[in-house]
Image (cartoon, rainbow, N blue to C red):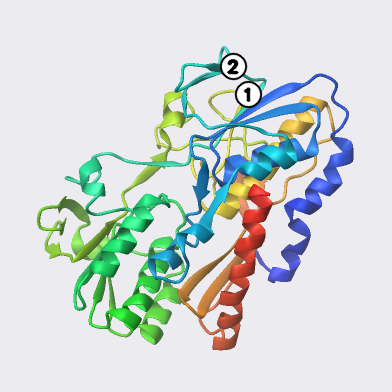
Amino acid sequence: MKSSTRREFGCLTGAALLTALRPRLALGQAKARVIVIGGGIGGATVAKYLAASVTTIDVTLVEPRRVYTTCFFSNLHLAGLRPLEQLTHGYEALAKQYGITVVHESAETIDPSAKTVTLNNGSKLSYDRLVVAPGIAFRGGAIEGYDEAAIEIMPHAWNAGPQTRLLRQQLESMEDGGLFVLVAPPNPFRCPPAPYERASLIASYFQRSKPKAKILILDAKDSFNAQDLFQDAWNRHYPGMIEWLPAQFTGGVTAVDTKTRSVITAGETFKAAVANVIPAQMAGRLAHQAGLANQSGWCPVDPVTFESALQPGVHLVGDAIIGGDMPKSAFCANSQAKACAFAIAADLTGSTRFPAHLFNTCYTYLAPDDAFSNAISFQPVDGKLKTVLSFVSKVEESADIRRLAARAAEGWYDAFTHDVFG
């Protein structure tokens, strides 16, 4: 793996790819029909880049929600640093500027043989190519007692929106000196650094408003993403406030008791003032219904075209796929979606297919004025996505560099969400 600087990733933007590909993608004659299911980051990006690059494809985006709230940056809302409305995006630009037909219904079933999608209102849509961006679902029974009712008492807040508001309200109502228990899930899961960023930013809120409060992280793992960066920051910013217990120490979380708001491990019970339980995850429901997920619970895909390895003619992007070295992150979903869109466009129009640029770049907050960043490039190698270039922040970075990263993150968010939603 070759190390690199962030500057070297500047040539890999989706806009540059779109500019290069557009004149080569206008050769198709008949109107092909592409349906994209799921209007999150991956699905919205596929729809936008297909519609923007090829005028001979009809693109339909199926998404039940009228607005989408980003999971990334939602930890800032939990810390009282950003209103949820600033994380909420609509689909109007995709419809008006790019001519995408946006259908606000749920996809109930997929029939890959008939090439049809049945919606919850009973109507059917037919397609030439289908892209599914189903996101994640939670594995039932992984934690005893953690059911639909328990979610409203011990929210996961892993799908941004109402759950995020609920957890924020609970934190605001918590008495000073209370214990906040965060249950971190086993691998793989959406956004590997996010549980620990959440603990960091909630600690910053406690520091300002509830300085006697404590945070306990009960982990299903024995190590976690960017552990050295987080633990260094916890010692610097929040000494004595955050305790992390690995699975080898606790035996893992086995159950919850909502009546006492307790989290139960193999050897001990922890009574929380507020409990944030993030369960084990798998690909979203629709992926399983359509036979797109294997025994792992996730979806195998071709790493070049993102076509399903189990259902020809169906493509998948985002958190639901088996991504090799690519983590389950919003930026990875965006990058995969662009590669998928260009591959579909090339196939449907008979145009030249160009090598995909797959990469991840993101910022993670350790405190309001302390953030770290990464930029990682990936390529298909022997049927898997492998890391080929990387830049990752180091523990020894100066406070000035971290402050600059925290400010740069705000611009990154605005540019990234504009790229997705227009």
Please tell me the numbered disc located at residue 115. Answer: 2
- Mark 2 to mark 1 CA distance (whole Å): 9 Å
The amino acid type found where label 2 is placed reads Lys
Q: Considering only vertical position in the picture, is 119 above or below 157?
A: above
Of residues 296 and 256, the one drawn nearer to the viewer in this rendering:
256
> Tag 1's secondary structure?
loop
Please tell me the numbered disc located at residue 9. Answer: none
Q: Considering only vertical position in the picture, is 205 above or below 360?
A: below
Q: Earlier in the sequence, mark 2 or mark 1?
A: 2
Residue plotted at (58% across, 46% down): 90
275 relative position to 73: left or right: left
Of residues 209 and 219, the one drawn nearer to the viewer in this rendering:
209
The amino acid type found where label 1 is placed reads Gly
* Percent coordinates x, y for residue 318 in the rendering: 54, 44
**Neighbour class for label 2 at 10 Å: few (<14), some, many (≥20)?**
some
Q: Considering only vertical position in the picture, is 224 above or below 99?
A: below
Circle 1 residue: 313
Please report contact status of discs 2 and 1: CB closer than 8 Å, yes or no: yes
* Percent coordinates x, y for residue 21 in the rendering: 83, 42
244 relative position to 410: left or right: left
Of residues 39 and 345, the one drawn nearer to the viewer in this rendering:
39
286 relative position to 242: left or right: right
Residue 302 seen in render: yes
> Tag 2's secondary structure?
loop
Residue 325 seen in render: no
Q: Considering only vertical position in the picture, is 325 above or below 149?
A: below
Residue plotted at (77% across, 52% down): 15
Classify residue 7 by image quadrant.
bottom right
